[in-house]
Image: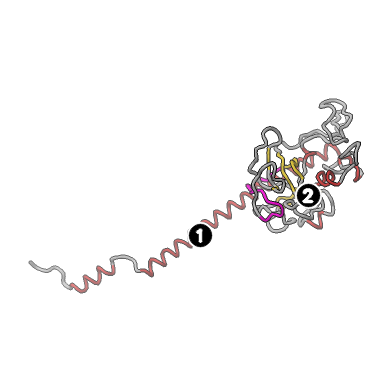
Amino acid sequence: MKNHIANPDRALSLSRQESGFTLIELLLTVTVMVAIAFTVTGTFIGVDQDARAQLTRVEMQEVAAAIRQFRQDTGYYPKQGLFNHVADGGSIDLDPGNDPDPAVDISRFESPANLEQLYQEPTTDNDIPATTTGPCANCVMRWDPDTGRGWRGPYLKRESLVDVGDDLEEDGLGNPDTIATGPHLNVLGVADPQEQAPQFDGGADDCTENLANTACLLDWRPRAGDPSFLTHGRPFLYFIMSSADANVTGCNSPCVTAFGLNGRYDQGNDDDIVVSVN
């Protein structure tokens, strides 16, 4: 039988060359694939973050529009003028018949996370309206169809209750995840569209939500019914004081501020989002 391999050494050499990638070639291939995957993943993450930020802006604009409508109906912004508390020249007595406007009630009223005036009609005695229709003895400004003036809410439809630290001031200083004296529990607010874990007092660690854990802040529950906890983001903050302009970057009061994707209030810096009402 004839041997058809003219050059056995050359055939062996070709066989070795065609047998597969060398270790260096494999490493280079894997490196390139990892780089491509990282680039694609990073692009997707960036797109997702941009989309979430845009969604947050859209919802902030809804809150800003509600605040503008409040002013158009009443002539005042929420928590301004007649809709402010007595100690600041308004008509709302936060503790009638007792010690007017105690510090705790004032702090809760002034909390930038407190948007209750967009949801429920403000009253002079900080109680429920005496009537739901017609003249109202304790309403700050009941809607009058003849004059086209008065509170004509609710101005927003979605609301929940949130626990907020009292360290955050209406001028934009402080932190909503920190307790100075005591937490503000069950504040009527609006959550951003992100999903964030509640924070232990001081913001160092996540905390477990339960009604007894009053040091667990930025946790949400329904306004009515079973006190089950909700997975929500951070509360939108409403700044009405002109002093907030110097403390919250980008704020031209009144303004609405969101914590951003990092879930941390940075006074308008970092990835915070600030939207002017006007």
Residue 13 visible in the displayed image: yes
Residue at which label 2 appears: 166
Q: Could you tell me the amino acid type at mark 2?
A: Asp
In the rendering, at what x and y percent does residue 55 appear?
65, 46
Q: Could you tell me the amino acid type at mark 1?
A: Phe
Q: How crowded is mark 1: few (under 14 residues within 10 Å), some or many (20 or more)?
A: few
User: Which numbered dot is residue 38?
Assistant: 1
Q: Is residue 38 above or below residue 135?
A: below
Q: Nearer the viewer, residue 113 or 205?
A: 205
Q: Quadrant of the N terminus?
A: bottom left
Lower position in the chain sequence, tag 1 or tag 2: 1
In the rendering, at what x and y percent does residue 159 appear?
71, 38
Left or right placement of residue 224 versus residue 111 in this view: left
User: How is the structure coloured here?
Assistant: secondary structure
| Predominant secondary structure, magenta span | loop
In the rendering, at what x and y percent does residue 197 appear?
64, 49
**Residue at figure coordinates x 68%, y 39% from the top left:** 221
Residue numbers of the magenta segment: 190-204
Left or right placement of residue 48 versus residue 271 in this view: left
